[in-house]
């Protein structure tokens, strides 16, 4: 049955004058929207500066600031190291997980931004129904009304909660800060992976050089042992001397498996760091490393490292996010205004479905205010404030830890270079001693066993020097990592102070 025609009703699509009721709704919406400039809760401000001290606790290089820290491994002149680090940065699973965490934080930020906009949904339906003629509504006794009806409906529904006191804007502020913290933490993962790859490579190459020198020591002791056995057979030396020589050879020979295991473990670790099976880089067991020079590293001002350390930057962003969370919790103390609107077309016949007389609409403003909740909202605000204080203390702890890492790394590297220089002096002296022994042996002044003794001391010095070189190279990696090397630095002015703590400002 066709619905009866009725007079033209006011609708959202009217081109003529608005109805007084619709005008009042429009005025109400416009007036409430003007209140959305207000935001409650603390505004995040740059925290007060904390003095980082007058400088390093020990003398450093002359240069005022380090250079090329973003790709520091390339300055070492080792093509194999460059290949390993670049491959790890592209394939390492920890880095890929950190990238996924950035994607998650970005999606959460977009979700927070979407809360500031209304939600709109559209739909259409065809509802065929039959009502009981004997039910509460006497359909059978109403002329012109059929018990069976087909209702055609199409329209939209919209809902919008006005951000009167800044809940959504504070949530977006916090989501942005958390996204930035995730990005900084991802940079920290990149720094760590680059450093771990370099460390494993230096441990592998150092173990290889140490193994070469130790094998030479074992070979020399074996020759000495054979000579001692021959002299003992002639009665020139006592059996105790042969046993003592055998003990030295056995002790030196027993060190070889441990060195080989350290070298293999470092190479297997490289495979995992490169996001591959452990055995991928086993060919490096026999690779020849480039000669590595360990320079005095100019580290710049001590405060400069704080703007490069991702852990410090991430801690500051978490502090900003926790400050925004206080504002989100504070908005629960104030009223909320939401507006629901709907409209569309409804008819009993497809021919009348989109006729202007079939239009329908509704507007529903709703104000809600939590007047009593047993103190839960204020307790939540106190909890958010406590979290903010924890974040401020965590930021301070990150700053102090960064300074401590840099100081220790600088001290260790300086001590390592000093120890290496002394080992090198001992090695040079051992080489000269072997040269003298060879000349004397050629002249017949000394026996072969004395020449072997000088060669054994040389090989032992080579072993100690190789170990010291590998240790110092690892300490150089630790220093690069401690001063924030390994990622592109933001353009930011340097300062002798860093921001610390949180200042709570008045909400607008």
Image (spheres, rainbow, N blue to C red):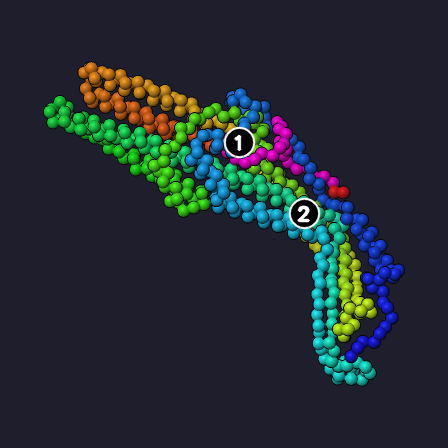
Image location (x, y in percent) of residue 503:
68, 37
Give the distance between the C-alpha atoms of the residues marked 2 and 1, in whole angstroms: 33 Å
The numbered mark, 2 or 1, whose residue comes first in the sequence reads 1
In terms of depth relative to the viewer, which is nearer, 209 or 425? 209
Question: Are dots 2 and 1 in contact, CB under 8 Å?
Answer: no
Q: Is residue 488 magenta?
A: yes
x 81%, y 54%: residue? 29
Q: Which residues are drawn in magenta?
A: 478-506
Residue placed furthest toward the left: 234
Q: Which residue corresponds to mark 2? A: 172
Q: Residues within 10 Å of mark 1 (few under 14, many from 20)?
A: some
The answer to whether 170 is drawn above or below residue 219 in the figure is below
Residue lying at the far front of the rendered structure: 351
Residue sitting at 76 percent across and 56 percent down? 338
Q: Nearer the viewer, residue 419 or 108?
A: 108
Residue drawn at point x = 21 percent, y = 18 percent: 441
Using the image, determine if residue 154 lies above or below residue 313: below
Check disc 1 and report its element: helix, strand or loop: loop
Write the residue at 32% across / 37% down.
Answer: 260
Q: Main secondary structure of the magenta part?
A: loop
Give percent across and percent down for residue 272.
43, 44
Counting from the top left corner in percent of width and height, residue 313 is at 59, 37
Relative to residue 175, is residue 418 drawn left or right?
A: left
- Left or right of 191 in this view: 218: left
Q: Dot 2: what SS? A: helix
Residue position marked by numbered label 1 in the rendering:
69
């Amino acid at each position: 049955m066709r619905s009866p025609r009725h007079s033209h009703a006011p609708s959202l699509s009217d081109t003529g004058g608005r109805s007084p009721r619709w005008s009042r709704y429009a005025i109400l919406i416009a007036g409430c929207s003007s209140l959305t400039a207000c935001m409650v809760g603390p505004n995040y401000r740059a925290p007060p500066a904390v003095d980082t001290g007058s400088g390093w606790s020990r003398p450093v290089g002359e240069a005022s600031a380090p250079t090329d820290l973003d790709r520091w491994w390339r300055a070492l002149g080792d093509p194999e190291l460059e290949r390993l680090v670049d491959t790890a940065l592209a394939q390492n699973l920890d880095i890929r997980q950190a990238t996924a965490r950035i994607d998650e934080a970005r999606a959460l930020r977009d979700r927070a931004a979407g809360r500031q906009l209304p939600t709109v949904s559209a739909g259409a339906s065809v509802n065929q129904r039959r009502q009981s003629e004997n039910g509460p509504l006497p359909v059978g006794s109403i002329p012109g009304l059929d018990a069976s009806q087909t209702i055609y409906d199409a329209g939209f529904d919209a809902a919008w909660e006005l951000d009167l006191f800044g809940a959504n804007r504070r949530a977006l502020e916090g989501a942005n800060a958390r996204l930035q913290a995730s990005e900084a933490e991802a940079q920290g993962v990149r720094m760590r992976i680059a450093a771990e790859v370099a460390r494993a490579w230096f441990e592998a190459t150092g173990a290889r050089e140490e193994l070469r020198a130790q094998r030479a020591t074992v070979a020399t002791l074996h020759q000495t042992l054979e000579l001692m056995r021959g002299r003992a057979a002639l009665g020139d030396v006592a059996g105790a001397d042969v046993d003592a020589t055998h003990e030295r050879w056995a002790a030196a020979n027993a060190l070889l498996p441990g060195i080989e295991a350290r070298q293999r473990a470092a190479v297997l670790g490289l495979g995992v760091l490169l996001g591959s099976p452990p055995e991928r880089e086993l060919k490096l067991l026999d690779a020849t490393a480039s000669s590595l020079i360990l320079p005095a590293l100019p580290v710049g001002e001590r405060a400069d490292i704080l703007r490069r350390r991702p852990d410090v930057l991430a801690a500051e962003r978490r502090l900003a996010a926790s400050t925004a969370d206080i504002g989100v919790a504070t908005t629960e103390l104030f009223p909320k205004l939401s507006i629901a609107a709907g409209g569309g077309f409804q008819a009993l016949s497809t021919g009348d479905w989109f006729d202007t007389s079939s239009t329908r609409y509704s507007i529903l403003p709703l104000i809600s205010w939590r007047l009593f909740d047993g103190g839960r909202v204020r307790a939540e605000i106190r909890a958010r404030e406590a979290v903010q204080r924890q974040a401020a203390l965590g930021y301070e702890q990150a700053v102090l830890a960064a300074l401590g890492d840099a100081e220790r790394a600088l001290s260790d590297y300086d001590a390592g270079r000093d120890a290496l220089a002394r080992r090198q002096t001992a090695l040079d002296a051992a080489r000269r001693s072997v040269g003298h022994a060879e000349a004397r042996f050629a002249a017949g002044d000394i026996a072969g066993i004395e020449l072997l003794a000088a060669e054994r001391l040389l090989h032992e010095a080579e072993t100690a020097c190789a170990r010291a070189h590998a240790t110092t190279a690892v300490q150089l990696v630790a220093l690069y990592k401690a001063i924030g090397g390994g990622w592109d630095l933001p353009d930011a002015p340097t300062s002798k102070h860093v921001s610390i703590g949180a200042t709570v400002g008045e909400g607008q």
